[in-house]
Image (spheres, rainbow, N blue to C red):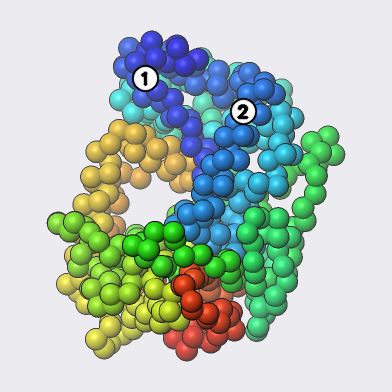
């Protein structure tokens, strides 16, 4: 397979995220039919041998250990696991080490038979004539049969004039559209109970988890022949919660900084929400980055987290706003790294900046000039990213998967330009005050993940969940 690809002068890569797995290839125009044939063979008829799988498991074991040793890589993963405890988006993207021994060829085949179905697939092309794309897709994928229509052949839907095809036997949701009543989930408790997560307890280095929801999931040995069909329509249920990791020992090199890390998140908007552009603008407006930056136009040096936090407090190593959008939910918040003695102060600064974008008046309230700057920066970033064919291709496929159509760049820019200060303030209040009403009926509680650092000869009391809740509640952020 590799030799065939190299002879074509192209490449194939595979990437997985929480809601999709993407096979992507780049090749010369003349090699598109052959390249798509290789992709189809890889997706539909892979020769997964036990020896090959064992080699990949050994590689995965090494990579998992490396990721767990880097807080900047593992903490965003743990934010999701704490925010959606034991369900949907909270299932680990990074395989727990204890699960590796349970993975074999039968598990791989069960996964493929569950998810690799035509009603869940989108084939996207960039730089290929649409009629040619239709013909090639029919040639290599046209005989696939969906789960609910085992006897009827696949039909190919011509979504629009772009080279994008949605493979489906009948209308179905791409990921997490809900048919479950929100009332089936527990209401947020006044004080989240400290019930341990059955999934998180299997993760290496796990220390403590508190959440506003009771347990739903259990951990058991995988038996494909005894496993009931997965319910793939269950909406993502945001629980909120707190996760504390073991302290980071001082680095061997005394020149390296001693750091603590803290992430503060709230349930945000799904990607299909019309307010998603306002939330993206808020993330750009907050901005942030590391304590060192080369600066320059478009680098966000005038964003709030730079001007109000990084430029004012020398003990802050990094402070960045993040926004993750999924089919039926999302996460919005701030991640930061700071001196170990300043974790509580860091949380106060994060709460202050989040509270400021919800205010009607005052020094911290949103101003037209900074909102216009954030809108311009967001449009600029969007246009520059879409200059890449690979980014354009991924964007095309994901939009058809989520929206059922391609949202053009002009349409996106018009929606960004139409935003007002009032729009941003309204969306900020909805997200940060815990008043969202997503399909999963989330708790509205904050999510906090902390990993404190140690200093030589210094002993400190751990930052407790009760104190964290009280500090966040004083700023009227989230629900408790």
User: Number of marks in the image?
Assistant: 2
Depth check: give the residue in front, 107 or 160: 107
Depth check: give the residue in front, 344 or 362: 344
Please indicate, yes or no, whether residue 430 appears anywhere in the rendered image: no
Q: Is residue 55 above or below residue 189?
A: above
Question: Tag 2, which secondary structure?
Answer: helix
Query: Which image quadrant is residue 27 in?
Result: top left
Taking the image as shown, residue 368 lies to the left or right of residue 205, namely: left
Identify the residue at image location x=58%, y=66%: 246
Q: Is residue 365 above or below residue 247?
A: below
Neighbor class of circle 1 (other Cα within 10 Å; few <14, some 14-19, many 20+) is: some
Query: Which image quadrant is residue 221 in?
Result: top right
Residue 261, image x, y percentages: 45, 67
What residue is disc 1 on?
Answer: 10
Depth check: give the residue in front, 237 or 412: 237
Please indicate, yes or no, whether residue 256 appears anywhere in the rendered image: yes
**Which is more N-terminal, label 1 or label 2?**
1
What residue is disc 2 on?
Answer: 55
Q: Is residue 446 above or below residue 126?
A: below
């Amino acid at each position: 397979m590799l030799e065939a690809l190299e002879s074509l002068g192209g490449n194939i890569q595979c990437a997985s995220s929480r809601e999709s797995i993407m096979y992507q290839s780049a090749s010369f125009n003349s090699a598109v039919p052959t390249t798509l044939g290789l992709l189809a063979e890889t997706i539909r008829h892979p020769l997964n041998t036990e020896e090959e799988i064992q080699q990949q498991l050994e590689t995965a074991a090494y990579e998992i250990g490396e990721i767990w040793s880097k807080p900047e890589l593992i903490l965003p993963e743990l934010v999701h696991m704490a925010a959606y405890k034991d369900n949907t988006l909270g299932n680990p993207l990074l395989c727990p080490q204890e699960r590796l021994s349970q993975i074999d060829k039968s598990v791989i085949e069960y996964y493929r038979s569950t998810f690799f179905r035509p009603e869940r697939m989108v084939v996207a092309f960039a730089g290929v004539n649409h009629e040619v794309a239709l013909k090639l897709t029919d040639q290599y994928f046209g005989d696939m049969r969906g789960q609910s229509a085992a006897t009827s052949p696949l039909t190919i839907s011509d979504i629009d004039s772009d080279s994008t095809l949605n493979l489906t036997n009948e209308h179905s949701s791409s990921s997490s559209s809900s048919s479950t009543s929100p009332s089936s989930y527990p209401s947020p408790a006044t004080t989240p109970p400290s019930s341990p997560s059955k999934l998180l307890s299997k993760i290496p280095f796990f220390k403590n988890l508190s959440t506003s929801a009771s347990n739903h999931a259990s951990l058991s040995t995988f038996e494909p022949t005894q496993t009931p069909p997965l319910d793939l329509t269950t909406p993502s249920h945001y629980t909120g919660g707190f996760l504390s990791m073991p302290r980071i020992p001082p680095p061997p090199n005394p020149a390296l900084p001693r750091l603590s890390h803290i992430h503060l998140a709230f349930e945000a908007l799904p990607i299909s929400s019309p307010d998603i552009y306002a939330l993206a603008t808020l993330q750009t407006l907050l901005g942030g980055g590391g304590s060192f930056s080369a600066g320059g136009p478009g680098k966000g040096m005038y964003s709030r987290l730079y001007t109000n936090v990084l430029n004012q407090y020398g003990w802050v190593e990094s402070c960045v706003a993040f926004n993750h959008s999924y089919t039926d939910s999302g996460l919005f918040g701030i991640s930061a790294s700071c001196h170990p003695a300043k974790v509580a102060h860091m949380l106060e600064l994060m709460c202050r900046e989040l509270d400021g974008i919800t205010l009607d008046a005052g020094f911290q309230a949103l101003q037209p000039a900074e909102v216009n700057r954030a809108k311009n920066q967001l449009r600029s970033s969007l246009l520059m990213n879409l200059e890449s064919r690979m980014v354009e291709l991924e964007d095309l496929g994901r939009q058809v998967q989520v929206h059922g159509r391609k949202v053009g760049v002009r349409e996106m820019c018009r929606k960004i330009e139409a935003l007002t200060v009032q729009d941003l303030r309204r969306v900020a209040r909805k997200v940060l005050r815990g008043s969202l009403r997503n399909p999963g009926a989330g708790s509205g509680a904050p999510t906090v993940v902390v990993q404190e650092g140690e200093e030589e000869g210094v002993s400190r009391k751990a930052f407790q969940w009760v104190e964290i809740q009280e500090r966040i509640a004083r700023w009227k952020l989230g629900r408790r």
